[in-house]
Amino acid sequence: MRKLIKLIILGIVIALTWRYLDEKGISVKDLVVDSIEWVKEKVDEAKEFTMQEAGEGRDGNSSPGDDRMTSVITSSRMSHSTPRPAPDPPLTARETQDTLPGEPLIVEASNKEVAALMEIDDLFDWVKEATRIYSPDTWHMLMEYDGLPMLSETKLACGGTRSMRKPASTFHYLRGNTRSDLLGRMSVNVHEIAHGYYGYNVFRYEKENDITVYWDNISGYIYLTPIESYYISFSKEHLVPSGELAARIPNNMRTYRFDTYINGNTSTQCEGVFGLLDELHAYYLGSKNNYDMLEAYKLAAGNYTSGIIDWIRDNYSSMAALFEFDYFIMEYLLHMRDKYPSNYAQLRSYEGFSAAYSAVRTIYVQLVSEYLDKIAAEIDRINKSNTHRAEIREGRFWVTDLRSGWGAGTRIISEDKYTLLPVLNSDRYREVERDFPVVFPERGIYKHYLSDN
């Protein structure tokens, strides 16, 4: 009987506390969500994506449960690792308030596409249509991939064929229970399909262009925009595993993705610098998709300020991937120059690598710069209102409701950027930069655009 009374009293206290916090606009939910998500991310990191992974996503051309595919390629490819945002430290209740009042959303009546978007009830259809409207370049890549056959093959120079099944359905990685969840997962989906497109579209390209295919070559197709893409093919025997970099990267420079892509068992081992370039390219496309979707985030959140915060939270880690993979690639090139001069000379002489690396690096730097500029522009816009105050406070985007005094904020970009900027801006890679003038037409590109944000 005493236990029952204690439980009843405890229930009343919890209910009254919950009601009080709710009336004050404090979200208890977010206090535990970040911790739960962090644990889930750590579990997910242990689950490598393989080419035989069963489909669980929703696809426009197949019903749920029917998109299981086994991908078999006669020339082995190691797996890629699903992109994971670096976990943000749990915030306090005052920081994570999810009921922070925002400016009302105003949709122009003349914008028929957006008006039609707001009428879509199905969450998956909604995020797909939002992607088509707001991120047409990444949508184009998804549709190109969608149109590729289920099985492709090319003839090898030495006789025989090389074949591969389609790695996954087009929206295999799209999962979530809310519009905001799905917007974040769409960037993961774009990242993974970019990997699939990189390794699978080469069959179409080689066949259409009558390219002689060599068994031991690493081949890939880098997509950036509907009018800019790069086919690359290089002998595997002239490459070394990225794992060799572990001995030369000090502990204080081992950023969030070090364990996965330098020590891990991903394509960066058997494909070396081309595996790192593929990752740089896939992280760019995932980041580009997220960047483009700011207005969709506002629609999904239902108010202006919450939408911006959700958008930044889904961008802050992937934008920093630029610095990590550029650092990994630079260290890889320096390592080749020091230890494998003949292989390094072969890579220098291959124009396809320089052209693709230069293009991805340049467009990614531009994207991160535009992302930081966009945040500054949103701060200016918010500060023109009479209800909210926005600022950058210790590396965080912060919005305060002037009426209640409550605020919410999130980190703008992962601290890995600040870890790597000093070495990327140093003279450590001076000789590598001279050897690859196409990639490095000028020095200090980060110093000019990104170092003070």
Image (spheres, helix red, strand yellow):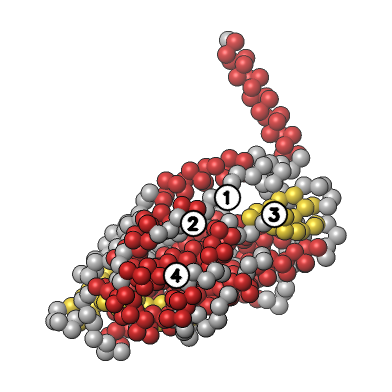
Q: Nearer the viewer, mark 3 or mark 1?
A: 3
Q: Residues within 10 Å of mark 2 (few under 14, many from 20)?
A: some
Alpha carbon separation for disc pair 2 and 4: 13 Å
Which residue bears the numbered disc 1? 88
**Extreme residue toward the top, this view:** 1
Dot label at residue 253: 2
Disc 3 is placed on an element classified as loop
The numbered mark, 4 or 1, whose residue comes first in the sequence reads 1
Q: Amino acid at mark 2?
A: Met
Q: What kind of element bears circle 1?
A: loop
Give x and y (percent) for residue 70.
Answer: 27, 62
Give the spatial CA distance, label 3 vs label 4. Answer: 29 Å
| Residue in the foreground of this view, choosing between 34 and 418 | 418
Mark 2 vs mark 3, CA separation in Å: 22 Å
Mark 1 vs mark 2: which is more N-terminal? Answer: 1
Q: Quadrant of the C terminus?
A: bottom right
Q: Is residue 309 visible?
A: yes
Q: Where does residue 34 sit, x and y in percent of width and height?
A: 57, 45
Residue 305 image offset from top left, x and y in percent: 71, 58
Q: Tell me residue 14's x, y (percent).
A: 66, 28
Q: Which mark is residue 394?
A: 3
Give SS at disc 4.
helix
Label 2 SS: helix
Name which quarter of the figure residue 223 lies in. bottom left
Residue picked out by circle 4: 330
Mark positioned earlier in the residue sequence (2 or 3): 2
